[in-house]
Image (cartoon, rainbow, N blue to C red):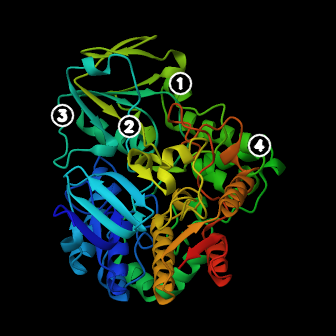
Amino acid sequence: MNPSESEFDVVVVGAGFSGMYLLHKLRQLGLSTRVIEAGDDVGGTWYWNRYPGARCDVPSMEYSFSFSPELQQEWRWTEVMAAQPEILDYANHIADRFTLRRDIEFATRVESAHYDESEQRWRIKTDTARTYTARFCVMATGCLSVPNTPTIEGAENFSGDVFHTGNWPAQGVDFSKRRVGIIGTGSSAIQAIPVIAEQAQHLTVLQRTPNYTMPAHNRPLSEEFRQQAIENYDEIREQQRQSMTGIVGYGFGFGGADNVEPTEAILETTAAQRAALVEQEGFVAIRRFADVALDTAANELACDMYRQQIKRVVKDPRTAEGLMPKGYPMGCKRPVIDTHYYEAFNRDNVDLVDLRRGGIETITATGVQTVQGHFEFDTLVYATGFDAMTGALQKIDIRGRKGEALRDHWEAGPRSYLGLQVTGFPNLFTVTGPGSPSVLSNMLVSIEQHVDWIADCLTHMRDRQLATIEPTLAAEEAWVGHVNEVAQGTMFTAPSCNSWYLGANIPGKPRIFMPYVGGVGEYRKKCDQVVANDYEGFVLSA
């Protein structure tokens, strides 16, 4: 064997929460495992996304692992929705508690993963010239791990500092005495803008598409509540696994009407009733109505209520108008939560450039030239999101049977069976890949389910002395059809919706709805049924 080549049962790519749990689980099975991680430490998306205000949008007591009762009992979250530093601390605690780092190769990028049919092994090459071979390769590369930086003319000419929210310096950034321009108003920007506004001399927000966002009403967790949740974890976890999104909202909620089940019909209300609800409850009044998610007329009434509330919060009428989402339905993009986002635009040092009134022409040495004029900055921040779900996979040269490239297999859009495997790529697994609930769910619930499924599958193969597993083309095609069928009729696939769920934020990326809308509980049932039917849809060879 080549001295620079190492053999393992399993190679895992990525040391975020998926990769860490996989390593722990595979060790328990007695499988030799190596995890390869591009970063200098564990944490995945929470390692890279250190931008100001970064926070989870899932209640922290539920954004945690259930596989270890001891881990559940000992960790103490401090807030209803944890901030990035605390989540990264949690990831480090897991790595320390289960001594994971000894089997992780840090600061190493995977450049290629090729399947050798004659040896029935994957050969994984890295940028350190080291090669790994393994019977199984698991891509735990994350759904939001490849920052998307748009191609803008003149970008290389800017003489100031440039940052991307998805790849933030570990030491942080001091914005004091700086004129900052931020491009984008997605989730990262909505979290970062209020914090940067407090620090910067001046902040200019360059917005292409206004977003819908709800106030988080975040708050500290009391010890009494924390203990109550811990004591009821068994019940909470079971409810999570059978729920739609993997979130129960056990005693949490965002406050106010957010805790009300959406049972009312907005189409049965009058304009006066809707105006009164906005006055009484603000943004969260919209959550009362069940028909908003499925009926376009109902959705537009909710959007109008939302715009009324922006008028109430933002003092300057022109800025308020610029912040109002129009022309696409509420719910077609990932829900965003914020802390004083709209209030930030009432500050004297914050300006909005609504690019719908005239877009960016070029970036200059000193700022950004738009149709509306030139805006000067010392610092430029890209808050432009990610090449979601498939970006990390397609950055690696992955080749299956007969040398077929995954990029070619996905030329018309990502295709998989259950979001777990791809036809023609035996013994290659993806964790929370396209075709699974993934980004529409509490990721840790979905990660646990996928890792457990993969581990059970490898145990099944070992016990029966099976060599390979891959889905049939028919099963893959049927699942892709089912994923798209379930999404039809929801706001996710509305004609006016251009979201990263569809890959619409990446030029040239095929538009196909990637996550599974059917829900975490229903998806789990389908995966379990596949196993009960002797791995229906898969071909397992001796």
- The tag on residue 383 is 2
Q: Residue at x 26, y 63 (%)?
A: 42
- What residue is disc 4 on? 296
- Total labels: the figure holds 4
Q: Residues within 10 Å of mark 2 (few under 14, many from 20)?
A: many
- The tag on residue 317 is 1
Whether residues under marks 1 and 4 lie with C-beta atoms below 8 angstroms apart, the answer is: no
* Residue 342: percent from left, percent from top: 46, 39
Distance in Å between CA atoms under marks 4 and 3: 45 Å
Q: Name the foreground residue: 417 vs 41.
A: 417
Q: Earlier in the sequence, mark 4 or mark 3?
A: 3
Asked whether residue 241 appears in the rendered view, the answer is yes
* Residue 367: percent from left, percent from top: 29, 17
- What residue is disc 3 on? 176
Q: Residue at x 50, y 27 (%)?
A: 208
Q: Name the foreground residue: 538 vs 64.
A: 538
As displayed, is residue 239 above or below residue 214? Answer: below
Q: Quadrant of the N terminus?
A: bottom left
Q: Earlier in the sequence, mark 2 or mark 3?
A: 3
The three-letter amino acid code for the residue at tag 4 is Thr
Q: Residue at x 50, y 53 (%)?
A: 402
